[in-house]
Amino acid sequence: MTSGIPAGYLRRLGITDPGAPSAPGLFALQRAHLERIAYDNIDIQLGRPPGIDPELSARRFAAGRGGYCFHLNGGFALLLESLGYEVTRHAGGVNADPADRGVSGGHLTLTVRVDGTTYWVDAGVGDGPYEPLPLREGTYEQGGFRYALERLEPLEGEAPGWTIRKFAGPMPRVNFRDAPAVTADFEGMHAWLSTSEESPFVRTFAVLRRDAEGADALRGRILTRIDGAKGTSERELTDAEEFFEVIGTVFRRDLGDLTPVDRAALWARVSRAHEAWLASRQS
C-alpha cells in the first residue's frame, strides 16, 4: 500500500489482493466497503467529531470505526487512488425533496474512470446503490431497488452536474456538480454538520449499512430494514444492551473505543431524543 493507507483498511474490507484497476475490482471494493464499514455519527453524538483528513479516516476504518460521507468517501477515494484508480471528488447534496435541484456541498461523492467507462461511486450515502453505476442517463436495477441517473438542470448561477434518484429511503435525490473538488472544500460544512445544534447529525443518532439484499438503518432507537424483495420492517430498541449489540453485529462497528462512560452518555442522549420524538408524534 502507498503512504497514508494502513494495511488494516483492506483487511477490514476482507480483500487481500485487490489486483490491478478494473471495473470488477472497483465493484468488489464498493460492495465490501458498504457491507463492512458503516455510516455512523457516533463520535459527533459524543461531542468529539473526527476531522475529515482522508488519511485519518483510513486509520479509523482500519481500527473498526465508521463515519459519514466526508469520512467514508474521502477515505475510499484515497484507497482507490493508492490502488491506481482514476478518482474525482465532487461536491454534492442529499435532498429529501425529490424536486430539489440544489447542491448544498453537504455531501462528498466520487466518480471513477476505469476500463474506458466513468462510474458514479459512493460509499457514503448509507442506503444508496450497492454497486457503482455508469455515469450516463438511464434507469438501473440492483437487487430489487431502482435508481435513475439524469443530467442536473442547475439552479441559476450554479454549475451543471448530475442527479441520482433513489426510489427507496427518506432521501430520494442526490445531486452533485461536474467540477472536481478537494478535501478543503468541505471543511466549513463539516464544522457545521458536526457541531451545530441545527445539524441533523447533531440532532439525530444514525447508523446505516448496505448489503446485497437491502439496507439496515438505526435512527435514534428505531431499527429499520429495507429489503428489495420483502419490503420494509422496523422495531424499537428498548434497552442499552440491545442497542449496542445491534451496532456491533448488524452494523459491524467495533465498539472498543467506547468507554462505559461513553456508552452511558450515548444511550442517554439517544433516549432523550427518542422520547422527544415520541412526544412530538402524539401532539
Image (cartoon, grey):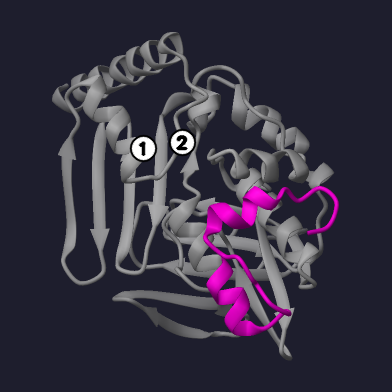
Instruction: Name the amino acid, label 2.
Output: Asp
Instruction: Reply above or below: 136 against 95.
Output: below
Q: Magenta residues, as a range?
A: 1-29
Crowding at label 1, few (<14), some or many (≥20) Cα neighbours within 10 Å? some
Q: Does the image show residue 107?
A: no
Residue positioned 38% across, 45% down in the render: 251
Crowding at label 2, few (<14), some or many (≥20) Cα neighbours within 10 Å? some
Q: Which residue does the numbered mark 1 point to in the structure image?
A: 248
Q: CA distance from mark 1 to mark 2?
A: 6 Å
**Is there CB contact under 8 Å for labels 1 and 2?**
yes
Residue positioned 59% across, 48% down in the render: 69
Q: Quadrant of the N terminus?
A: bottom right
Q: Is residue 209 magenta?
A: no
Q: Secondary structure at mark 2?
A: loop
Name which quarter of the figure residue 203 lies in.
top left
The residue positioned farthest toward the top in the image shown: 261
Residue positioned 76% across, 56% down in the render: 78
Q: Quadrant of the C terminus?
A: top left
Instruction: Reply above or below: 192 against 77.
Output: above
Residue 3 place in picture, x, y as percent: 85, 51
Q: Does the image show residue 15?
A: yes
* Nearest to N terminus: mark 1 or mark 2: 1
Q: Nearer the viewer, residue 224 or 15?
A: 15
Instruction: Reply above or below: 176 against 12.
Output: below
Residue positioned 29% across, 37% down in the render: 246
- Residue 254 is tagged as 2
Is residue 63 rendered to the left or right of residue 35?
A: right
Q: Secondary structure at mark 1?
A: helix
Is residue 273 rendered to the left or right of residue 80?
A: left
